[in-house]
């Protein structure tokens, strides 16, 4: 299921503004990769380039290629909807459909794909909720609105919704930034379990979190405001946090900059 991602010279623009410049990296399947760096260096832009969500913003475009198991998601004849199904996304703030039931939230993507049979939807919903470590907490109130859950539960509901369609890659954009420490740990544990099945890329501002959850870390930075963000260093997380090759990485992780 999980897929390898190969970004080659990815440059992304908002209109004329070049937000990231020539980012190249290989993300191995069934691994967790953390994107870190100061505000505005392009972490979210790069993340959204992976599943072609960047171009949803008017005037935004991407140059370069992103190969997922050897297929460039930017090829001309690619079905963008299929790309976004294969590469799921979880956002900063939990965003369940508020009036929809917990059950309907989880199966929303499957219904969009045309799955109608109740039995099939039930099996898929339970699998996804178990996968997101939420089943025990919600199994007796699946028909209640998603908005009635705590923030941490809502975020796990969003993860269940993302994995219900069985993507191969899951992108997470600061998934814990709106959560308390206990919910944050629950999501971090979950990320550790999910990498058995998925390739995960996570943007985080929390350095301890990057160190705890990821196998590889990519440090992005920018020279100054108005300049594009660039990938400064990409290596095993342990190396980045104990013995980085670049002084800029060391300055950032030790809090001297950014
Ligand atoms: N919708 C947009 N329109 C125009 N410029 C944008 C847009 N979104 C982001 N940018 C700009 O692109 C650059 C990179 O932004 P991005 O959000 O990718 O950075 P980031 O590293 O994720 O930042 P943060 O850590 O603050 O979330 C910034 O200069 C930002 O102002």
Image (cartoon, rainbow, N blue to C red):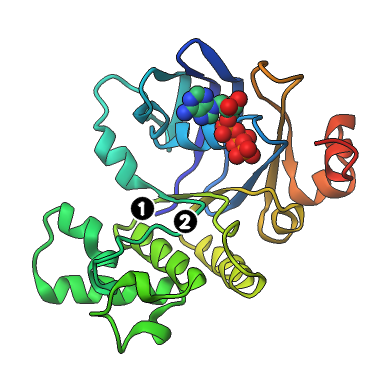
Count neighbours of disc 2 (C-alpha within 10 A) and say few if under 14, some if 14 to 19, many if 20 or more.
Answer: many
Task: Please tell me which residue is depicted at 66% across the width and 54% down the height of the picture.
Answer: 214
Pointer 2: what residue?
198
For residue 231, what is the image quadrant? top right
Q: Ligand 1 sits in which quadrant?
A: top right
Which disc, if any, is residue 67? none
> In the shown orientation, is residue 221 left or right of residue 250?
left
Identify whether 13 is placed above or below 105: above
Q: Position of residue 225 (x, y in %)?
A: 70, 20
CB atoms at circles 2 and 1 under 8 Å apart? Answer: yes
**Is residue 36 or residue 182 the one in the foreground?**
182
What x and y, as percent, mark residue 50? 46, 35
Q: As displayed, is residue 100 above or below residue 13? A: below
**Where is residue 106 shown, x and y percent of the image?**
29, 66
Of 87 and 152, which appears nearest the observer?
A: 152
* Residue of label 1: 167
Q: Earlier in the sequence, mark 2 or mark 1?
A: 1
Q: Residue 96 vs residue 186: left or right?
A: left
Give the distance between the C-alpha atoms of the residues marked 2 and 1, in whole angstroms: 8 Å
Looking at the picture, does residue 236 appear above or below residue 156? above
User: x, y percentage for residue 97?
Assistant: 30, 60
Residue 7 visible (yes or no): no
Look at the numbered disc 1 and say if its residue's Cβ is closer than 8 Å to ligand 1. Answer: no
């Amino acid at each position: 299921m999980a897929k390898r991602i190969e970004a080659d010279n990815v440059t992304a623009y908002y209109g004329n503004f070049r937000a990231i410049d020539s980012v190249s990296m290989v993300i191995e399947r069934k691994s967790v990769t953390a994107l870190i760096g100061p505000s505005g260096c392009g972490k979210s832009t790069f993340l959204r380039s992976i599943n072609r969500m960047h171009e949803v913003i008017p005037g935004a475009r991407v140059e370069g290629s992103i190969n997922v198991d050897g297929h460039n998601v930017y090829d001309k004849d690619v079905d963008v909807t299929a790309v976004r199904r294969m590469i799921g996304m979880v956002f900063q703030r939990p965003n369940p459909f508020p009036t929809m039931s917990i059950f309907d939230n989880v199966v929303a993507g499957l219904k969009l794909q045309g799955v109608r049979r109740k039995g099939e939807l039930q099996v898929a919903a339970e699998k996804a909720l178990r996968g997101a470590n939420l089943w025990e907490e919600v199994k007796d109130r699946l028909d209640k609105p998603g908005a009635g859950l705590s923030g941490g539960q809502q975020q796990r509901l969003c993860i269940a919704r993302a994995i219900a369609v069985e993507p191969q890659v899951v992108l997470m954009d600061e998934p814990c930034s709106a959560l308390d420490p206990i919910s944050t740990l629950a999501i971090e544990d979950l990320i550790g379990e999910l990498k058995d099945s998925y390739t995960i890329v996570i943007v985080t501002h929390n350095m301890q979190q990057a160190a705890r959850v990821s196998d590889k870390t990519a440090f992005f930075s920018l020279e100054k405001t108005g300049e594009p963000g660039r990938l400064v260093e990409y290596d095993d997380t342990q190396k980045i946090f104990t013995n980085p090759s670049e002084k800029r990485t060391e300055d950032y992780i030790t809090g001297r900059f950014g």
